[in-house]
Image (spheres, grey):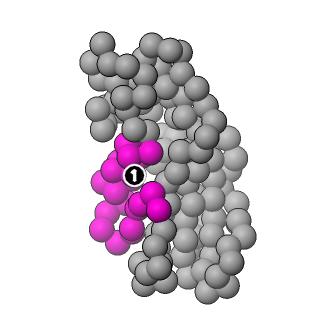
Amino acid sequence: MAAVGSVDVELLVIQWLQGQLGSGVVVRDELDNNLLNELPTVQVERIPAGGDDGFRLDWALVDVNVYAAARSEAVTLSLQIRGLLLSQLPGSTTGGAVVGRVATVTAPGVRPYENTGLRRVGATYEIYSHPVS
């Protein structure tokens, strides 16, 4: 049996969103200096919270931030992602894991960002998963 932590939930969500959103949206874990030239960008980060059952089940809190040139674009994409995560990801097998449950912890909302040329809208989700085998 696989040990807890054998599923990288952050990578799972990144790869899954890339497949759902297509090539017009950059999905990544870390931002780089070229952000203004790669809009819209979705940043996915597992935050240091959550837990596991010590055996197979992993409970992760994941921040999903959308960066876009316009607030309306960031809001629209963030709401699209929320819909996908809540309706399509649960029950799927992807990235070596079975996703059992996805819930919204904080709904999409405008978050401050130091670059006034960008708009940032973020949300936090809890994702329950376990390895396929």
Q: How many marks?
A: 1
The vertical placement of 106 against 69, above or below, is: above
The x, y position of residue 72, in whole percent, is: 61, 75
Instruction: Locate the C terminus by quadrant.
Output: top left
Q: Visible in this render: residue 28?
A: yes
The x, y position of residue 39, in whole percent, is: 46, 77
Residue 97, by quadrant, is top left
Q: Residue at x 48, y 68 (%)?
A: 31
Q: Visible in this render: residue 39?
A: no
Q: Is residue 124 magenta?
A: no
Q: Amino acid at mark 1?
A: Ile
The vertical placement of 75 against 129, above or below, is: below
Instruction: Locate the N terminus by quadrant.
Output: top left
The x, y position of residue 28, in whole percent, is: 41, 60
Q: Which residue is mark 1?
A: 14
The vertical placement of 50 against 132, above or below, is: below
Q: Residue at x 39, y 67 (%)?
A: 26
Q: Judge from the rendering whether residue 6 lies leftward or rightward of residue 127; answer left or right.
A: left
Q: Residue at x 54, y 76 (%)?
A: 68
Q: Judge from the rendering whether residue 94 lies leftward or rightward of residue 115; answer left or right.
A: left
Residue 95, by quadrant, is top left
Extent of the magenta region: 10-30
Q: Residue at x 68, y 50 (%)?
A: 107
